[in-house]
Image (cartoon, rainbow, N blue to C red):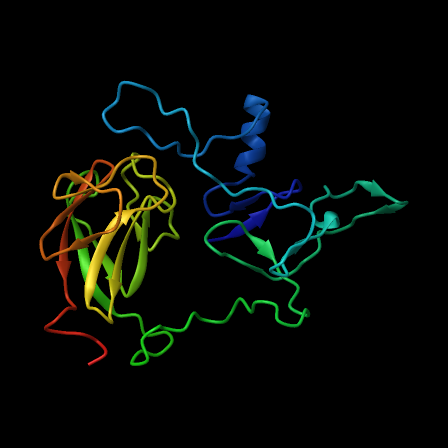
């Protein structure tokens, strides 16, 4: 991903957009841009909502030592106090999968973006995240594709940074529509809804809370139906 920032402070992918899509949409519509609205299941009404592209953070430092500097969001060339900007400031940033945020690495206790999240299981090591099972699409736009499940939470959505990215189904929300999880302590899998607009199902039955999965159960997300194939469980576990 070639992440860029426009003079108005919008972040966008330079590989897919020559100019900032938010600014271009505002010019055309005179308002907020719309990105990949999630379509309702079953039809009968229009999808009026828009997917979140990241809320604007207030100026100033928050409790997590992230901060936005007013000077960083001002268009180049704007006069401020008798001085003119000549180039945008450069600070390290991190793709958190949500909003791009700057960090002051000089602040004691500030989050180091290069740190890896340590595995919960004492038998695992950082960087070792083997597959523990699969979801295989048997119905829907991505029919025939398989998706790896790893230990812990696996968020499902259309966005590229999701753990399980189902790109072709527009009735799946961009971010955190649903999740599938594996607990290597109890050796069980669960599937349930997250922040998606449309209902998810296990074996064609609506689920409102995480539900335990068993081998060859089917899960429905948007218009996609996926079959669950476990690797780990009572007969095999990476910790052993």
- Between 169 and 155, the residue placed more toward the observer is 155
Residue 118, position in %: x, y?
A: 40, 73
Residue 164, position in %: x, y?
A: 29, 52
Q: Is residue 10 above or below residue 189?
A: above
Quarter of the image for the C terminus: give it: bottom left
Q: Is residue 164 above or below residue 173?
A: below
Q: State the residue at coordinates (55%, 52%).
A: 100
- Between 7 and 67, the residue placed more toward the observer is 67
Q: State the residue at coordinates (46%, 39%).
A: 52
- Which image quarter: residue 6? top right
Residue 46, position in %: x, y?
A: 34, 21
Q: Residue furthest right?
A: 82
Q: Residue furthest top?
A: 44
> How many badges with numbers are in the image?
0
- Between 28 and 159, the residue placed more toward the observer is 159
Residue 116, position in %: x, y?
A: 45, 71
Query: From the viewer's perspective, is 124 left or right of 161?
Result: left
Q: Is residue 232 above or below residue 70?
A: below
- Which image quarter: residue 110? bottom right
Q: State the residue at coordinates (47%, 30%).
A: 34
Query: From the viewer's perspective, is 69 left or right of 54?
Result: right
- Which image quarter: residue 147? bottom left
């Amino acid at each position: 991903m070639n992440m860029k920032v426009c003079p108005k402070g919008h972040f966008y992918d330079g590989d897919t957009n020559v100019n900032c899509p938010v600014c271009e949409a505002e010019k055309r519509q005179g308002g907020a841009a719309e990105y990949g609205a999630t379509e309702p299941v079953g039809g009968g009404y229009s999808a009026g909502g828009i997917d979140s592209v990241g809320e604007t953070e207030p100026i100033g430092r928050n409790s997590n030592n992230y901060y936005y500097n007013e000077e960083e969001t001002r268009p180049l060339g704007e006069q401020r106090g008798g001085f003119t900007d000549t180039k945008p400031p450069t600070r390290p940033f991190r793709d958190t999968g949500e909003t791009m945020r700057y960090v002051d690495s000089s602040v004691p206790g500030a989050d180091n973006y290069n740190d890896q999240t340590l595995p919960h299981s004492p038998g695992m090591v950082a960087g070792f995240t083997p597959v523990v099972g699969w979801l295989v699409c048997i119905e829907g736009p991505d029919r025939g594709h398989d998706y790896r499940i790893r230990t812990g939470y696996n968020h499902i959505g259309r966005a590229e940074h999701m753990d399980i990215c189902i790109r072709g189904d527009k009735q799946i929300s961009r971010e955190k529509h649903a999740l599938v999880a594996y607990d290597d302590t109890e050796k069980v899998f669960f599937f349930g809804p997250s922040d998606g607009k449309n209902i998810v199902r296990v074996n064609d039955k609506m689920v409102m809370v995480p539900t335990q999965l068993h081998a060859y159960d089917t899960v429905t997300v948007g218009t996609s139906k996926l079959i669950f194939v476990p690797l780990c469980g009572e007969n095999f576990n990476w910790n052993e």
